[in-house]
Amino acid sequence: MYAVVKTGGKQYKVAPGQVIKVERLAGEAGDQVEFSDVLAVVKDGEVTVGRPRVENARVSGEIVGQQRAKKILVFKSKRRKGYRKMRGHRQYVTEVKINEISC
């Protein structure tokens, strides 16, 4: 059994027991979270696709920790002008362990 959920503007394929990294969610380690934007559910080979969401479907999980992702480097330059600029960015992420998919 697995589901496709939407959070933070992205879609994730999740299954019970899986740990995923999503954009920052409010809460501390050990807090419960629930995703209500479930776009699809596959259970026993039967596929249920929502329009746009699957009715009464919920994915619940537990926050494992708050972290920052790997650094992304942004480099800008203009040829023959001597203009060079380097910037870095680290996104805040939340690790979530998926406990249950209910529909």
Image (cartoon, rainbow, N blue to C red):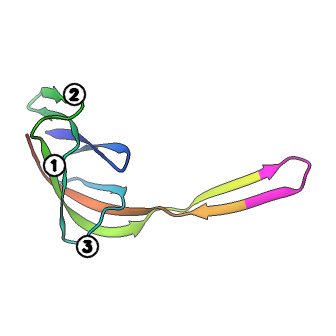
**Residue contact at pointers 3 and 1, CB within 8 angstroms:** no
Q: Quarter of the image holding residue 11?
A: top left
Q: Position of residue 17 (x, y in %)?
A: 17, 54
Q: Residue furthest right?
A: 80
- Which residue type does callout 1 highlight? Val
Nearer the N terminus, badge 2 or badge 1? Answer: 2
- Left or right: where 58 falls relative to 86: left
Quadrant where the N terminus is found in the figure: top left
79 in magenta? yes
Q: Label 3: which residue?
A: 28
Please provide percent x and percent y for residue 80: 92, 48
Q: Is residue 9 above or below residue 19?
A: above
The label shown at residue 59 is 1
- Rate crowding at label 1 as few (under 14), some (14 to 19) or many (20 or more) other CA atoms within 10 Å: many
Compared to 28, does 49 lie above or below? above
Q: CA distance from mark 3 to mark 1?
A: 18 Å
User: Residue 100's spot in the image, x, y percent?
Assistant: 11, 51
> What is the distance, in whole Å, between disc 2 and disc 3 at their CAs?
33 Å
Seen at 15% across and 27% down, the residue is 47
Q: Name which residue type carries label 3.
A: Glu
Q: The residue tagged with tag 3: helix, strand or loop?
A: loop
Residue pointed to by mark 2? 51
Q: Nearer the viewer, mark 2 or mark 3?
A: 2
Q: Which region is colored magenta?
A: 77-85
